[in-house]
Amino acid sequence: MLTAFGRYREWNPLIREIAGTVEVGAPIKVRISRPGGWGSMTIRPVVTVISKYEFCWLGKVVSPRIFAGRHSFRLVEQDDRATRFIHAEDYHGILASAVTGVFGRPIAASFRAMNRAFRSHVEYEFRQGLGADGHQIG
């Protein structure tokens, strides 16, 4: 579901669009739009991890020494009826503390909204018997 880029607009209030190839080393285009907030922006990170349970990208401004952010989504199976979703962003570089100091709270609030939307979307799809691509399972 996390790599079904064409479906992000259906459920994600923060990341409205992702375009590109789902493979390690590939650049992707991510359009972020915070509802009721600072408008939208487009970033062009590179996919660093892709698996059945994890999807990560790394974005940078000029150089990783200036500012870089590693965004990750992980699915951790708890048992046969539950999966834990771990969504994280790690910032590095000279400007990291300044960026998190100014934008930390709004970013955290946007991530929480996205996490709630993801959960609702997954639960709805499960109840409908749909797979990650939106098609009926079985």
Image (cartoon, rainbow, N blue to C red):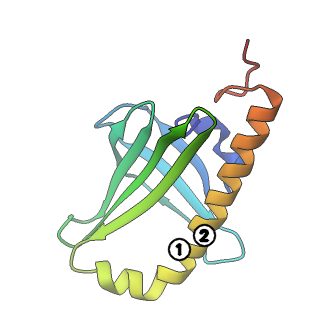
As rendered, which of 129 and 70 lies closer to the eye?
A: 129
Give residue 117's position: percent from left, percent from top.
70, 55
Residue 10 placement (x, y as % from top left): 73, 45
Please state the horizontal and vertical placement of residue 14, each as a whole percent of the image.
62, 61
Q: Residue furthest front?
A: 79
Tell which residue pokes out farthest to the top in this image.
Answer: 138
Q: Quadrant of residue 91?
A: bottom left
Question: Which part of the image, by quadrant, shows the N terminus?
Answer: top right
Q: Is residue 42 visible?
A: yes
- The residue under label 2 is 110
Compared across the picture, whether 94 is left or right of 32 comes to: left
Determine the secondary structure under disc 2.
helix
Question: Which of the labelled discs sits on residue 94, or is there none?
Answer: none
Query: Residue 47's spot in the image, x, y percent?
Result: 35, 42
Q: Relative to 110, does residue 77 appear above or below in the rendering? A: above
| Residue 102 shown left or right of residue 23 in the figure | right
The amino acid beneath tag 1 is Ile
Q: Is residue 19 left or right of residue 131?
A: left
Q: Are circles 2 and 1 on residues that touch, CB within 8 Å?
A: yes
Name which residue lies at 34% across and 65% down: 90
The single residue placed furthest to the left in the displayed view is: 65
Q: Is residue 43 above or below residue 3?
A: below
Residue at the spot of label 1: 107
Helix, strand or loop for disc 1: helix
The residue depicted at 82 percent of the width and 30 percent of the height is 128
Residue type, numbered disc 2? Ser
Residue at the image position 49 percent from the left and 43 percent from the top: 75
Q: CA distance from mark 2 to mark 1?
A: 5 Å
Q: Residues within 10 Å of mark 1 (few under 14, many from 20)?
A: some
User: In the image, 16: left or right of 108?
Assistant: right
